[in-house]
Amino acid sequence: MMIIYLWAILFFLVMFGQSALLIWYSWPVIRRMVHCPWCWQSCHIMKHYPARWSSSMCPHHAQRIRAQLALRRVQRLAHS
Ligand SMILES: [Zn+2]
């Protein structure tokens, strides 16, 4: 009977270790998503954005702003 408990403890230890590793490796990505001021702005909670955070851009907004810049560049070239 004892062996079942041992297996259960081992199982939970391995599971805990795996999730810890997963969080450890994906932490920069998570931080990048959470620290995106554009996301906060689009959720209308920009006034709660902590000032001490260094702002970073999530992949979605990075792509959007790159597209905007490209559009502006094309428009400038068309006008000149
Ligand atoms: Zn964003």
Image (cartoon, rainbow, N blue to C red):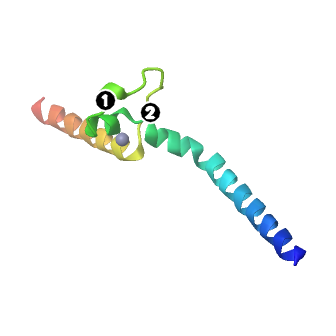
Is the residue marked by circle 1 packed among few (<14), some (14-19), or many (20+) residues within 10 Å? few
Q: Is residue 15 left or right of residue 75?
A: right
Q: Which residue position holds label 1?
A: 46
Q: Is mark 2 within 8 Å of ligand 1?
A: no
Residue beneath the point at 34% across and 42% down: 61
SS under mark 1:
helix
Q: Is residue 28 left or right of residue 70?
A: right
Q: Quadrant of residue 35?
A: top left
Asked whether 49 or 10 is in front, the reply is: 10
Asked whether 69 or 48 is in front, the reply is: 48
Residue beneath the point at 31% across and 25% down: 47
Residue beneath the point at 10% across and 31% down: 79
Q: How far is the residue under mark 1 from the one under mark 2? A: 14 Å
Looking at the image, in which quadrant does ligand 1 appear? top left
Asked if residue 77 is positioned above or below residue 30 in the image, the reply reads above
Residue 56, label in figure? 2
Q: Is residue 39 left or right of residue 53?
A: left
Q: Position of residue 12 (x, y in %)?
A: 74, 63
The amino acid at mark 1 is Met
SS under mark 2:
loop
Q: Single out the mark in the foreground, 1 or 2.
A: 1
Q: Position of residue 24 (x, y in %)?
A: 65, 46
| Disc on the earlier residue, 1 or 2 | 1
Tell me whether circle 1 and circle 2 mark residues in contact (CB < 8 Å).
no
Asked whether 59 or 72 is in front, the reply is: 59
Residue 25, label in figure? none
- Looking at the rendering, in which quadrant would you find the C terminus? top left
Q: Quadrant of residue 63?
A: top left
Is the residue marked by circle 2 packed among few (<14), some (14-19), or many (20+) residues within 10 Å? some
